[in-house]
Amino acid sequence: MNRYPYNSGHLMVAPNFHKARLEELTKPEYVEMFQLLTLSTRLLQTAMPADGLNIGINLGEAAGSSIRDHLHIHVVPRFTGDTNFMPVAGLTKIQSFALVEIYDSLKKHLKKLLQK
């Protein structure tokens, strides 16, 4: 989970090793990241009452990346009537649910998804 979420339930998928760019990923890292991205979207669609999802990669500081030289993918649940993604990425934070509640719910649903 993102410590400073753009929206409730905001997850991030990142490789285990520092990689600044997509082309630095090995094929197994690339495959694993997109498998985790798929699992993350399934998890959020199951555990959250989200109406949609934003998935994004910010490459470089000018693009909004706040973690230097560490590639990561944002998976942000969206709710009808919240805000569009650009203000959210521009440091407007929407919190609809308590972080601990979301964590507990995601953990419970993740266990179920992994058992399938």
Image (cartoon, rainbow, N blue to C red):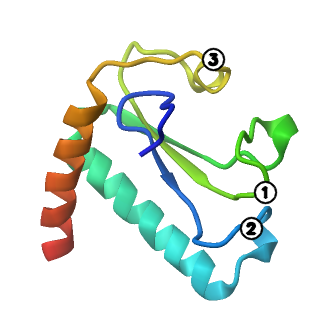
Which mark's residue is nearer the viewer, 1 or 3? 1
Marks 1 & 2, CB-CB < 8 Å contact: yes
Considering only vertical position in the picture, is 87 above or below 47? above
Amino acid type of disc 1? Answer: Asp
Label 1 sits on a secondary structure element that is loop
Instruction: Inspect the image, locate mark 2, and give the three-letter code of the amino acid beneath it.
Output: Lys
Give residue 69's mark: 1
Q: What is the crowding at mark 2: few (fewer than 14 residues within 10 Å), some, or many (at least 20)?
A: some
Q: Residues within 10 Å of mark 3 (few under 14, many from 20)?
A: few
For label 2, the residue is: 19
Q: Residue at x 60, y 79 (%)?
A: 29
Kindly tell me whether residue 78 is visible in this rendering: yes
- Residue under the image location 65 percent in, 86 percent down: 27
Which one is closest to the eye, mark 3 or mark 2? 2
Q: Earlier in the sequence, mark 3 or mark 2?
A: 2
Q: Position of residue 19 (x, y in %)?
A: 74, 67
Residue at the disc numbered 3: 87
Give x and y (percent) for residue 106.
Answer: 23, 48
Looking at this view, is 78 or 105 the one in front?
105
Evaluate whether residue 116 shows in this view.
no
